Image: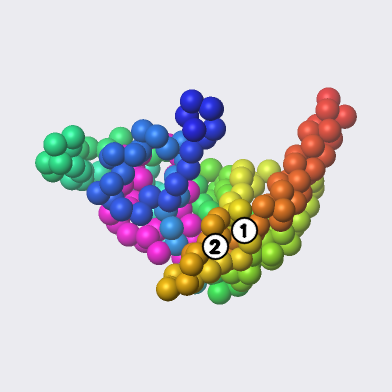
Amino acid sequence: MINKGIPTATEFLDPQLYPYISDLICWGAIGARTTESQIHRQMASGLGCPIGFKNGTDGNIDIAIDAIHAARAQHLLCVPDQDNHQQAVMTKGNENCHIILRGGKGPNYSEKHVSDVAEKLKQQQLDTRLIVDCSHGNSGKIAKNQLNVARDIAGQLKSRHKHIAGVMAESFLVGGNQKLGNESLVYGQSVTDECLGWIDSRELLDIFASAVRSVKQGELETV
């Protein structure tokens, strides 16, 4: 992917593995269940790529803001070296951290949600730019609902709201999901959360492409 110039991204789950892959990653996420983990916050402070912290599974935004503050600071932590021996290192702190709105008990992708979170970040003297996850709590874990989220976000972009820096979506070759068991598996279909299939994924990309073109055209007309 690097040779093709395609950016790579991942969710950093295991703090013991990141030293082996971090130089291959352009952007990383810390999941809703690990945003509150001090070990993951310390890990983020030592990563050289931008890191997004998801809000909690209940929708709690404050733990993600706390995580950003923690990741911006220096930390002493133990990581394996090339010989798999533990070594103590001092991190530099990561200035490129942000929030990912992934919903909770209800969705949090609307203009009001985005504006409220941006205001909280501003009050904390943090970057107000954020990422919206079209899936998880924002879609009710129903894959097709991601298209509705995308349309709402596209509308916010067209209205010149500047806080949304990017989006996430769950997409695969075949839509829906399947359970692991004794039955043969469908190639290209998720074994975890529901995903958009290829056709729906193209529609989602077209929604955002149209919004971006509209914004750029508006900027050209005002120059």
| Residue 55 part of the magenta-drawn span | yes
Residue at 35% across / 54% down in the picture? 13
Where residue 24 appears, as percent x and y from the top left, is: 39, 34
- In this view of the protein, can residue 35 be seen by the observer? yes
Q: How is the image coloured?
A: rainbow
Query: According to the image, label 1 marks what residue?
Result: 174
Q: Is residue 5 left or right of residue 151?
A: left
Q: Nearer the viewer, residue 109 or 117?
A: 109
Q: Label 1's element?
A: strand
Provide the residue span drawn in magenta: 33-56
| Residue 173 part of the magenta-drawn span | no
| Between discs 1 and 2, the one toward the N terminus | 1
Q: Label 2's element?
A: loop
| Quarter residue 116 falls in | bottom right
Marks 1 and 2 sit apart, C-alpha to C-alpha, by 8 Å
Q: Nearer the viewer, mark 1 or mark 2?
A: 2
- Of the residues shown, which amino acid type is indicated by label 2? Val
How crowded pointer 2 is (Cα within 10 Å; few <14, some 14-19, many 20+) is rated as few
Where residue 4 appears, as percent x and y from the top left, is: 53, 27
- In this view of the protein, can residue 118 be seen by the observer? no
Q: Is residue 12 left or right of residue 127?
A: left
Residue at 83% across / 33% down in the picture? 217
Residue at 63% across / 61% down in the picture? 175
Tag of residue 186: 2
In the displayed structure, would residue 122 be above or below residue 2?
A: below
Q: Nearer the viewer, residue 80 or 197?
A: 197
Tag of residue 79: none
